[in-house]
Image (tube, coloured by chain):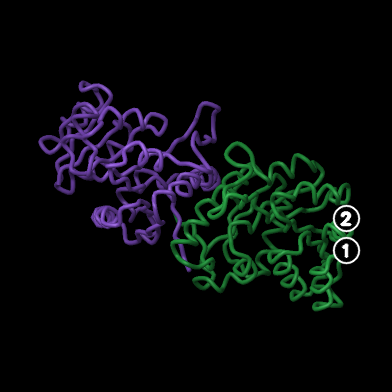
Chain colours: A purple, B green
Amino acid sequence: MKFGVLGTGMVGRTIGTKLVSLGHEVRMGARTATNEKARDWAREHAPKATFGSFGDAAAFGETIFNCTNGANSIEALRSAGDRLANKIVIDVANPLDFSKGMPPTLTIVNDDSLGERIQKTFPRAKVVKALNTINCAVMVDPQKVAGGEHDVFVAGNDGAAKEQVTELLRTFGWKNVVDAGDIGASRGLEAYLLLWVRLMGALKTPSFNVHVVR
Amino acid sequence: MKFGVLGTGMVGRTIGTKLVSLGHEVRMGARTATNEKARDWAREHAPKATFGSFGDAAAFGETIFNCTNGANSIEALRSAGDRLANKIVIDVANPLDFSKGMPPTLTIVNDDSLGERIQKTFPRAKVVKALNTINCAVMVDPQKVAGGEHDVFVAGNDGAAKEQVTELLRTFGWKNVVDAGDIGASRGLEAYLLLWVRLMGALKTPSFNVHVVR
């Protein structure tokens, strides 16, 4: 499949590399079409990997990963514009605010979420919130933690889109994909970050996750 | 031991009953000293169970459980006043706002928490946030879920107080008590409720929990 990965940070590069390793073609998008991190990453993973602007990556991908900084996600996706229509947008971002130091707070929380804002701003996109609750090394290698016996969540309004994302996550190695409901569940998945950062501090590692049990 | 349980709702009655069943003496406190729910509960569990005002319960208990509605917790604890000094206050409450319907939002979130506000308002109390992340039936019977292989969190500034609460939780049946850090971790533990309510909806049961794995 063809993927557009928006964002050149650790999360975008980690997910882009995983997708290439699974045989997919990936175009990484940045604010400018000449971003050095995107260029270096694409060179390292050629020929399956290419790079360009946010709009180039969104046009290229059949499915789009939003791996931009949560504070800039809406703006980044706006520059991809109409090219998101009818495509699955997997929103991995968190609206974290580090401006007051550690631990971060959230810029959107409680009665709204980034996932919902993206869906509202791009009503023709099929937004699926996923993977935002885990460190990026674990996102693409769930076996790293407890033999993979832990959970990733998906939330979104389009059931078929969630099923496709679930299948993709299974190819990443995820055994347990929990459907948390419609895109409104992003409120819970993003607010969980406030617990995640505390647990990271208490456990002294970002390499952990939660397993939901009944 | 002697416990004061503030609050006559399902959570207060469930925890009070568990404490009595473990052989403790429990005084349940309410806004008025003649609350019918407190009186009925105390009669049912006499002679270990008694009832009175919030102040009566706080004076009686060596350790205090705050099981009041999160929106009213500070006011309820204020009426217990100086009687909280040097005592452990186990804060089980969540600052949930149901005024806009389901799912609820939080009245305190992101850069503050109920746990922190209680500690700040009663600096001589030893506040330990605990048990607020689980349905009350599971709080007192963790074996109900996945053979008890899941976690309860404690957060607070006083290490010895957290150890005492941890020991108490073990007598409730908890195998895994995770120290989430100082009382500031209440931000994470309370914000998690926004995820909890979504998972309850998705799983169609309040009888679940999370297990943190590394």
Work out which residue is located at the far left of the displayed protein and give it.
A47
From the viewer's perspective, is A168 left or right of B155?
left
Q: Position of residue A190 (x, y in %)?
A: 46, 44
Name the amino acid type tagged 1: Gly
The label number, if any, that marks residue B55 in the structure image: 2
Number of marks in the rendered image: 2
Q: Position of residue A28 (x, y in %)?
A: 22, 33
From the viewer's perspective, is B211 left or right of B5?
left
Q: Position of residue A170 (x, y in %)?
A: 26, 57
Q: Chain of mark 2?
A: B
Query: In the displayed structure, would residue B192 be above or below residue B184?
Result: below
**Which quadrant of the figure has residue B35?**
bottom right
Mark 2 surroundings within 10 Å by alpha-carbon count, few (fewer than 14), some (14 through 19), many (20 or more): many
Name the amino acid type tagged 2: Gly
Near-viewer residue (A90 or A100): A90
Q: Chain of mark 1?
A: B
Identify the secondary structure beneath mark 1: strand
What residue is disc 1 on? B52
The label number, if any, that marks residue A183 in the structure image: none
Mark 1 surroundings within 10 Å by alpha-carbon count, few (fewer than 14), some (14 through 19), many (20 or more): many
Evaluate if marks 1 and 2 touch, with contact meaning CB atoms under 8 Å apart: yes
Q: Position of residue A110 (x, y in %)?
A: 53, 43
Q: How far apart are the two marked residues, 1 and 2, measured between alpha carbons?
A: 8 Å
